[in-house]
Image (cartoon, rainbow, N blue to C red):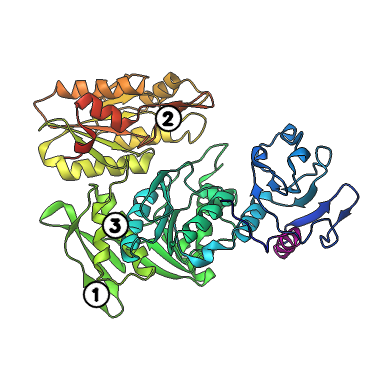
């Protein structure tokens, strides 16, 4: 059933925009004004809001944003459009009331929150940002908070959405469009949710998807160059600046103690009057995880709780990786700041978590392991190979990397992926991964050119399914050693962007299972 807020009217919308200094003018067929009070229907509840002209109905308010084509408005009056919010006048295409604003994305965020009855005020809001680890940390924190709240924690992540505490739905964006986000928050509240954990991308602040939203707990995990391209962030400074905005828009901050530019982030928090809780591996922090000396894949967590410290029983995540142990420290810190007692048994709920496409492990026999992971830039690839060497280094593993990278954006990843593995990976197989309008063979050849290790072999196999099969077949020819094949970049994605369109793809995990002959239920060792 469609949601209607009887207090959301043209008059209330205009007043909200005025308070945030976003309103430029109101355009009607008869005159231009700043006063909505005397306009037709000014105090009648607006029944629906949308940014899709195909969903416009009687009395709707439409947001016109992005690469909008004006011909989309042809015939819109017959559908019953009441008003539109835009940065330009469209009275040549419609007789609907035009609310002209200086920033339509900010306006959409504010008005969407108001339309859906400010659902964020009924949720303990957790926002997580950083270059790597957002998704895993979000899943881990969600598990803890969901256990503690007896199934009342929602989740917005790049992989999945959960609006009822137990049903996972596929996600489209790391951070949803503001209108969609507030609609789903409303649904979560109506489902009885009391908490929400969400990933917050740099683009969320770049294009104001979370404008006006204050997080009860924000987590800043780490920072390194990424998403730098003409269509994303022009520079690292711009990327970092966008991510830093979460600090001024939270009530308390959870910060990685080893995060680059740590001092600047502390200054940001001080300027905003935000209390900081730090987490990390070893070292000095309020939440510290240390490797378990009795289990290479396990850890022990210590939490500073006032004047005392609480050390939890040894734990081991379903997902291997020292970097995931750091993510666990972040999740524990987030949970504590969100009100979970340090010694709560709910902390152990994260041990059951497996994030699709994040360190998924498949065993192809005693001497063959295949990992599927979302690693897609220098720091994540380096961390992945570091972990393989930490856990399996004593067995002198032969490591194969299967990787491509995106076309038309984040160009620095091409060298970064190779650099993160160089000198330790013995075989590189370059393949397709969202080439978009570029030739995937050109991308692969460019990546191949960065392999300067004379001992490493390289090959290009463009069909991704064939590349994975070839890497596994090659590994089996070296059965005198432990072979580890790392299939990276796509994680759980089941499509490739080619020539601007999504093309269905089986998925890395499905390909690995098929090649190894593994039933989905037995995907982990």
Question: In this view of the protein, which residue sits in the foreground, 186 or 88?
Answer: 186
Of badges 3 and 2, nearer the viewer stands 2
- Rendering coords of residue 358 (x, y %): 31, 42
Visible in this render: residue 283?
Answer: no
**Residue 10 located within the stretch drawn in magenta:** yes
Mark 3 vs 2, N-terminal side: 3
Q: What residue would you read off at disc 3?
A: 328
Q: What residue would you read off at disc 1?
A: 309
Return the residue found at the far bottom: 307
Label 1 sits on a secondary structure element that is strand
Label 2 sits on a secondary structure element that is strand
**Residue 433 located within the stretch drawn in magenta:** no
Marks 1 and 3, Cα distance to the nearest angstrom? 17 Å
- Rendering coords of residue 485 (x, y %): 23, 31
Marks 1 and 2, Cα distance to the nearest angstrom? 47 Å
Label 1 with label 2: CB-CB less than 8 Å: no
Mark 1 vs 3, N-terminal side: 1
Q: Find residue 297 and name its label.
A: none
Q: What residue would you read off at disc 2?
A: 495
Q: Residue at x 34, y 58 (%)?
A: 141
Work out which quarter of the rendered image holds the C terminus and state it: top left
In the image, the segment drawn in magenta is 9-20
- Rendering coords of residue 296 (x, y %): 15, 51
Q: Main secondary structure of the magenta part?
A: helix
């Amino acid at each position: 059933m469609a949601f209607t807020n009887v207090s959301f009217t043209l008059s209330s919308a205009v007043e909200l925009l005025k308070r945030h200094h976003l309103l430029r003018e109101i355009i009607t067929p008869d005159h231009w004004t700043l006063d909505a009070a005397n306009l037709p229907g000014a105090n009648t509840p607006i029944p629906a809001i949308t940014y899709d002209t195909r969903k416009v109905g009687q009395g709707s308010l439409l947001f016109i944003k992005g690469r909008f084509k004006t011909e989309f408005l042809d015939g819109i009056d017959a559908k019953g459009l009441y008003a539109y919010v835009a940065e330009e006048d469209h009275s040549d295409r419609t007789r609907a009331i035009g609310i002209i604003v200086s920033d339509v994305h900010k306006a959409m965020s504010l008005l969407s929150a108001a339309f859906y009855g400010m659902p964020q005020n009924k949720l303990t809001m957790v926002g997580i940002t950083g270059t790597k680890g957002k998704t895993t940390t979000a899943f881990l924190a969600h598990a803890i908070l969901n256990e503690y709240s007896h199934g009342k924690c929602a989740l917005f992540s790049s992989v999945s959405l959960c609006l009822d505490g137990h049903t996972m739905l596929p996600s489209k964006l790391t951070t949803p469009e503001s209108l969609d986000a507030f609609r789903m928050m409303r649904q979560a509240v109506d489902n009885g949710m009391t908490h929400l954990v969400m990933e917050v991308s740099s683009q969320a602040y770049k294009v104001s998807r979370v404008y006006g939203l204050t997080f009860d707990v924000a987590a800043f995990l780490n920072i390194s160059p990424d998403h730098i391209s003409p269509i994303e962030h022009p520079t690292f400074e711009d990327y970092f600046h966008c991510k830093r905005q979460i600090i001024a828009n939270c009530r308390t901050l959870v910060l990685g103690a080893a995060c680059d530019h740590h001092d600047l982030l502390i200054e940001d928090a001080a300027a905003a009057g935000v209390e900081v809780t730090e987490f990390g591996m070893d070292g000095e922090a309020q939440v510290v995880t240390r490797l378990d000396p009795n289990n290479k894949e396990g850890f022990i967590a210590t939490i500073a709780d006032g004047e005392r410290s609480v050390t939890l029983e040894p734990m081991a995540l379903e997902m291997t990786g020292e970097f995931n142990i750091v993510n666990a420290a972040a999740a524990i810190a987030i949970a504590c700041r969100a009100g979970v007692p340090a010694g709560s048994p709910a902390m152990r709920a994260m041990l059951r978590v497996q994030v699709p496409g994040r360190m998924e492990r498949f065993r192809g026999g005693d001497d063959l392991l295949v990992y599927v992971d979302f690693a897609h830039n220098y720091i994540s690839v380096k961390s992945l190979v570091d972990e393989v060497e930490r856990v399996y280094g004593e067995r002198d593993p032969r490591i194969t990397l299967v990787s491509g990278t995106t076309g038309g954006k984040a160009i620095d990843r091409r060298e970064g992926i190779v650099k993160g593995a160089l000198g330790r990976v013995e075989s590189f197989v370059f393949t397709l991964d969202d080439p978009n309008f570029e030739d995937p063979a050109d991308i692969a050849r460019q990546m191949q050119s960065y392999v300067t290790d004379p001992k490493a072999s390289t090959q290009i196999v463009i069909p991704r399914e064939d590349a994975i099969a070839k890497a596994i077949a090659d590994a089996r020819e070296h059965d005198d050693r432990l072979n580890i094949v790392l299939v990276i970049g796509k994680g759980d994605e089941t499509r490739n962007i080619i020539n601007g369109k999504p093309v269905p793809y089986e998925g890395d995990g499905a390909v690995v299972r098929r090649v190894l002959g593994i039933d989905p239920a037995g995907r982990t060792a």
